[in-house]
Structure formats: C-alpha cells, structure tokens
Image (cartoon, rainbow, N blue to C red):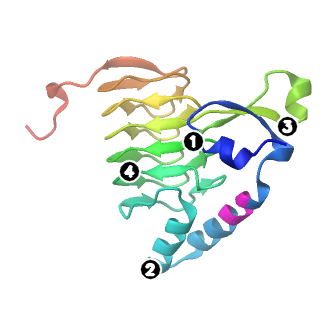
Amino acid sequence: MADYFEIMQKNEPYVSHFMEMPKHLQGKARKLLRELENLGDDQYERRTEILKDLFGTYHPLAFPGKGFMCDYGFNIHFHGLAVINYNVVMLDTSPIHIGEGAFIAPGVCLACSGHSLVGEERVKGIGTSAPITLEKNVWIGANATIVGGVTIGEGSVIGAGSVVLHDIPAGVVAGGNPCKVIREITDEDRLDK
C-alpha cells in the first residue's frame, strides 16, 4: 500500500487508488468545514483557528466565502491576500498554491483529481491527481473550472465559465471551453487613468 499522505503533498502528478486514500483526513476537513459554515460573522477568533487547522499554509488575508468546500485542506496553500467568493470547491488531492492577490469568483472549481479514461479502471477507483498553481494577482471568473496540472501565470484573468485544461501564461485574458488566450492585458485596460 502506497503512503498517499506523502505522495499527495508532492508537486508531481500521480495515479491514485480510491480505497487507499486517507479518508480519515477527509473526515477532519468535513468536520472543520461544517463548523466554519455555521459560524456567526462575529466569531472571528474561532474562524481563524479553524482556517489555521484546515489549510496547509494559512494566511490571515485569505478569505473563503460561504459554501467553500475542499477534500482535505492540508494541501491548500495561501501565499497572501486571497478573496474567495461563494461556493468555491477545491479538490486538493494534490497541492493547490494560491498566489498573493488572487481573486476567485463564485462557483469556481479547482480540481486536482481526475479519473481513469478506461471504464473498468474508473469503477475500481483508479484515478489521477496533479497540482494546481495560481500565481500572483490572478483573477478566476465565475464558474470557471481548472483541472490538475495547470498553472495560471501572474496577473492573468480567466473568463467566467472557462474550462482550463492547459497552462495559461502571465499577463493575459483567457477564456472559453477549452480555455485559450484571447489577448494580452495592456495599459489600455487600466480603469484608474
């Protein structure tokens, strides 16, 4: 039996076997997420304690909104300010690195995990996992999905509803299904001129 706890924390793709994954750690995350969801707005200290216990790298300026869900939590790493809107899902069977200045809109899914393309393997619980990285100042639009193995370059914007299957370079607007670069972000895009 593989040591999945160790394998899961590496920044490398791997083949997974559902029955061998550390389900007790999912239970811990679910318990913390239930408590987090039920906290009142004035329970800031307890909220901070839960987030420190849940995430692999906690940052006091990382703000998950209501409806936030994840598989494990320990594989989510915040590296600065992160605004995470409502109903965001992070399937963190591999590390998810969220760079400083990230904005993640409602309904976004960051899915490190996948399944075998072969039906007989899929029903046996054989799948895949690969890390996801959002570099600094990335904005992910509403209801976008980012799959395992993808890096979004610094300062890039992913359009609402996009399905991101491949790396996106820095400083661009990208969108669609599959997501493709639309154009570079330029000084003409500045609102505060």
How many numbered marks have been drawn onto this rendered protein structure? 4
Q: Nearer the viewer, mark 2 or mark 4?
A: 4
For marks 2 and 4, give the CA distance.
20 Å
At 38% from the left edge and 46% from the top edge, which residue is drawn?
103
For marks 2 and 1, give the CA distance.
27 Å
Whether tag 2 and tag 3 are in contact, CB under 8 A, the answer is no
Along the line of sight, which residue is nearer the eye, 74 or 32?
A: 74
For marks 2 and 3, give the CA distance.
39 Å
Q: Is residue 27 magenta?
A: yes
Q: Position of residue 165 (x, y in %)?
A: 56, 23
Q: Position of residue 10 (x, y in %)?
A: 59, 39
Q: Secondary structure at mark 4?
A: loop
Residue stretch in magenta: 25-29
Label number found at residue 109:
1
Of callouts 3 and 4, the N-terminal one: 4
129 relative position to 165: left or right: right
Query: The N terminus is located in which quarter?
Result: top right
Residue at label 2? 45
Of callouts 3 and 1, the N-terminal one: 1
Q: Secondary structure at mark 3?
A: loop
Q: Amino acid at mark 4?
A: His
Looking at the image, is 24 positioned above or below residue 150? below
Residue at label 4? 79
For marks 3 and 1, give the CA distance.
21 Å
Image quadrant in which you'd find residue 147: top right
At 92% from the left edge and 25% from the top edge, which residue is drawn?
120
Residue at label 3? 125
Q: Amino acid at mark 1?
A: Cys
Label number found at residue 13:
none
Whether tag 4 and tag 1 are in contact, CB under 8 A, the answer is no
At 61% from the left edge and 33% from the top edge, which residue is drawn?
130
Q: Amino acid at mark 2?
A: Glu
